[in-house]
Amino acid sequence: MRFALVAKQMDQSFYALAGEGCAEAAQAEGDTCLLLGPLGTEHFRRQGEVLRQALARDDLDGIGLAVTHSRWLAEHALKDAGRIPLIAFSSDLAPAEQQLRRSYVGLDNLQFGRQLAVLAQRFRPQGGKLCILSGGIQHTNHLERIQGIRRQLRGNPAEDGATGRLQGENGWSEPSRCPLYGNNDPASARLRLATLLAPGSQLDVIIVLGNWPLYEADEYRRQIGPLLAELDKQGRRPVIIVTTHEMDAAQRALLDDGLAQAYLNMEGREIGRQSYRMLKRLARSEPVPEKVFVASHVYLPGAPPAVAPEP
């Protein structure tokens, strides 16, 4: 059998790992899993064209989609869905469009956001000023993570209708310019982070919802290191918590050298493996769960990885 994952951006490292995990799991059973998606700058229209072409193929037994813009894809490329089994992976369709897919594989993004907030509370139990660096403003997975962060810091994990910026609850607040969106490019993400770390920064915690600034570890060290050293002199250094996946030695060194305080890992390969298994079951007309969540792990300086704590 032949399956495909349609990424938001095919040359982004997380999706490369998910594609490798899917391909490895498929090969072990004599199947094939392709990684498709636009190259270069991420955009929902470009992903929609790749998705439309994939849905028109007659050699695919199932497709996994990492959703960029749920409503737009539902109104355009996904209008042709139906013949080929479709799941969402990593980034789900919004609730209003979820009937278009058969299942979801990836993080419980609401819970993942709460886990990021637990790390913030670990370093700043008294609260503080928070800024979140996110991807595209339409990305359902990042919007859910932001919602989870705010719920946890508000101290009310239940759905309470409070979805806006933190405004002093439990000592936590967000400046009006935050969250900052559109950080999918490593260079722009580092620039945004450097702006937040400019002299006189009043932030206490920065949470990054992807690994974009760390992607080129040497550049991160060169650009961010001096800014952190200057803030250290002022006694005003913020905590930096970053979402990562399959770190290399250089990225681990950033953590051990104090250039970030914690990583929360997304386990891209395992999401790819589980996506293949879900697609294979659908292709065989076997029942599948509505969602399959993949666990995340915490990395702290000088410590081995540990399963992320329950909020």
Image: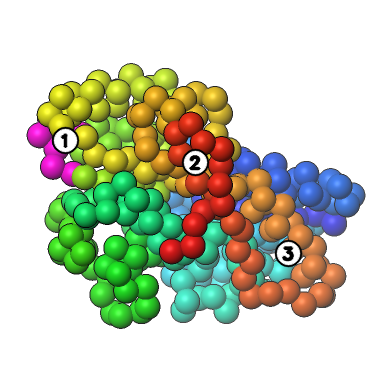
Label 3 or label 2, whichever lies nearer to me, is 2
- Quadrant in the picture for residue 257: top left
Residue 240 on the magenta segment: no
Q: Which residue is mark 2?
A: 299
- Quadrant in the picture for residue 166: bottom left
Q: Amino acid at mark 2?
A: Tyr
Q: Which residue is mark 3?
A: 278
In this picture, which residue range is highlighted in magenta?
197-203
- Residue 116 location in percent, x, y? 40, 54
Q: Which residue is mark 1?
A: 236
Residue 198 on the magenta segment: yes
- On the rendered structure, is 46 left or right of 162? right
The circle drawn on residue 210 is none
Question: For the point 86% across and 47% down, which residue is it?
Answer: 28
Q: CA distance from mark 1 to mark 3?
A: 47 Å
Q: Is residue 216 visible?
A: no
- Quadrant in the picture for residue 163: bottom left
